[in-house]
Image: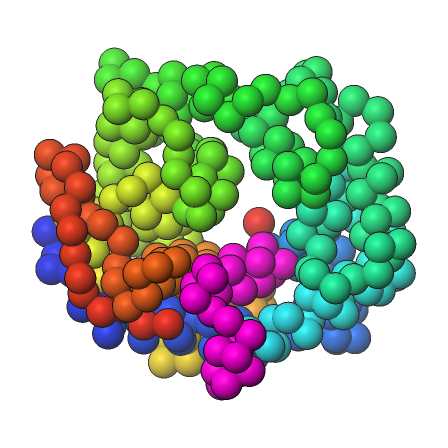
Amino acid sequence: MGTRSAAPDLAAVASLSAGARRWIGRHCGFLDEPAGRAELPVTPRVKALLQLALLYRCWSRATTVGAERTAETARTRPPDPDLAAVAATVEQVWRSPAHPPLLTVEARYARQFQLMYGALAPAGLDADGPHRTALAEGVAGDLLTPRRKSPFLHLETRYYAELADVKHQLLDYPELYRISRLARHTDRQPLAELDVCDVTHTVFHLTDFGFRGPGLGGADLAHARDRVERLTEESVRRGEWDLTGKLVLAQHCLGLDPLVTPSGAAALRLLVEAQSPEGSFPGRSATDRVPADATAVQFFRKSYQSTLVVALATVILLRPRAGTAGERPPTTSGSGERQPTTSAAPALGGAR
């Protein structure tokens, strides 16, 4: 698939988002049901729950329009049943004393999982709940120091340490960007040397998943945008639903409008066309589609990651902005100059 497709309109993207969020809301409970605990491998299930908590955090923030959402607005606005279903699963897991031991089943992930679990705890939990003990265990020792960390892990650790409000000795964000693979990639290197997950998560952590600016100078910002747009083109050509969803969000985080950039428009068109009537993405790519004879558990494991990514990307992309409810964020022209827009916008590892 090329990257010259016309962009879907906002209604199509809103429908894409609603479908993905609906599927996640209806199926996320399986992650902590007896059947899910019995049939899903432990570590992939832990990763999937951490991803669900991240979605919950971003989804909740995206539907809160700064100071304009008053207590009265919150009381009169109809509840979102899909968000409520995600909230119920996350809150149940984070209150359960049976969950923290699962974070340490795979030793190489244990301390990072404990940090993330503490950082992503939903509001309203007891101050001495299981998540606090897990967090304290995770940050003990040298986790929050630069020692023996890859640039990617260093940046991820800083992001979750900041989110958990724990003291650390990690490098500042600008320096972490400068040592990232994304920043160090040159025009002499093949694009294939860049890992999409590394690039997109670098952007996500720098920008708090689009809730703050990237803090990059003009040349660095242009470089990051160029690599993300080129990677988007490649992912669209290969029909990679999971990676395409991440790259759409990365474009937004870098101040681009995926409805306007040629690669972003093609990416959104790909996702709109690939989504099932139930709202899921049945696999990570067109070539990794769930077979027709898959069991319900196999379908869930194949569909969860891509569907959650699209839900996360679109709920953030379409969110109203504080002070500008009903407006989309500024777009950029091909020259990189920011352009105003007043289009109306509607209200975002897996279990493999």
Left or right of 217: which side holds 174?
right
Left or right of 81: which side holds 127?
right
In the depicted structure, whether residue 164 falls above or below residue 206: below
The residue shown at (70%, 61%) is 123
x, y percentage for residue 24? Answer: 53, 71
Give 128 or 141, whichever is nearer the viewer: 128
The residue shown at (39%, 30%) is 215
Quadrant for residue 183, please give it: top left
Magenta span includes 301? no
Give 43 or 317, whichever is nearer the viewer: 317
Q: Which residues are magenta?
A: 52-79
Predominant SS along the magenta part: helix
The residue shown at (22%, 62%) is 269
Left or right of 214: which side holds 57?
right
Is residue 326 in sight in this rendering? yes
x, y percentage for residue 342? Answer: 17, 62
Give 212 or 280, whichever is nearer the viewer: 212
Which image quarter holds the C terminus?
bottom right
Is residue 264 in sight in this rendering? no
Quadrant for residue 283, please give it: bottom left
